[in-house]
Amino acid sequence: MQRQSLGRVGIGLTFLLSVAPSAVCVSAPAVKLPMAQIVRARRAHFKELGRAMKALADQLRESHPDWSIVVRDSNRMTRLAGDLPGWFPVGSGPESGLTTRARASIWAEPTGFTHASQVLAARVRDLASAVSSRDRPLAHARAVAVGRACGSCHRQFRAHSSWW
Ligand code: HEC
């Protein structure tokens, strides 16, 4: 009996922590776990973005790309680029003590970071329109422009790392 109700409390708490990250940014002890999850999820999203970008670019280098892959990854990139600004809640930077390469300047210069996110979203949109017209050379050129938008934000807002 006792055990069962404790179990329920445990589940309830885990659920609360996993679904309500924005509600927990006030008290220090509760912050640890959700922030760790947020940063982990952010890095996983970026990995997904990197994989989509690579798979798409590999296809666009072929003379006969598999458009189903290109379309799939272009759609993925559109979704991820749109979500990106939401991956950086206050407190998820280096001050969290977590393994992250997000620079403090993301929050100190929010205008610059927002701009970099918007440039990416715009380049990804341009890419999607070339993809929808199945124009390989144009799509390729636009994928290169997307790559520049990634690099430009990284230079400004992603810290160097010697270990990964
Ligand atoms: C608006 C800024 C911004 C843009 C645009 C951006 N990134 Fe990043 N990216 C970051 C930051 C900041 C990090 C570090 C995240 C962390 O460590 O918490 C990162 C990390 C990454 C990582 C490493 C993930 C890991 O921890 O293993 C990859 C891969 C990546 N980005 C790929 C891309 C690709 C591909 C694009 C373009 C399609 C892109 N990024 C566009 C800011 C950006």
Image (cartoon, grey):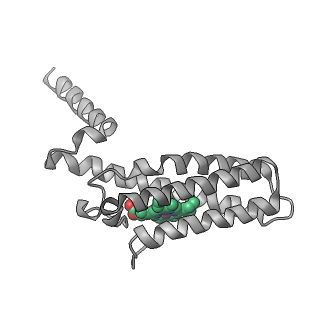
Farthest right residue in view: 64
Q: Decide if residue 152 is on the left or right side of residue 56.
A: left
Q: Is residue 14 visible?
A: yes
Q: Where's the N terminus, which quadrant?
A: top left
Q: Name the residue: 70% across, 61% down.
A: 142
In-front residue for pair 63/13: 63
User: Image height check: is 120 above or below 79?
Assistant: below
Question: Picture coordinates of residue 82 (x, y %)?
Answer: 52, 47
User: Image height check: is 129 above or below 153?
Assistant: above
Examine the image and state in which quarter residue 108 appears: bottom left
Q: Name the residue: 62% across, 62% down.
A: 146
Farthest top residue in view: 1
In-front residue for pair 134/24: 134
Q: Report how many numbered discs are placed on residues in the image.
A: 0
Question: Picture coordinates of residue 16 (x, y %)?
Answer: 27, 33
User: Image height check: is 157 above or below 107?
Assistant: below
Q: Is residue 69 visible?
A: no
Question: Picture coordinates of residue 93 (x, y %)?
Answer: 30, 60
Q: Where's the C terminus, which quadrant?
A: bottom left
Question: Picture coordinates of residue 53 (x, y %)?
Answer: 63, 60
Q: Name the residue: 39% across, 76% down.
A: 161
Examine the image and state in which quarter residue 162 appears: bottom left
Q: Decide if residue 1 is on the left or right side of residue 88.
A: left
User: Image height check: is 55 above or below 27?
Assistant: below
Farthest front residue in view: 111
In-front residue for pair 27/103: 103
Q: Name the residue: 77% across, 47% down.
A: 132
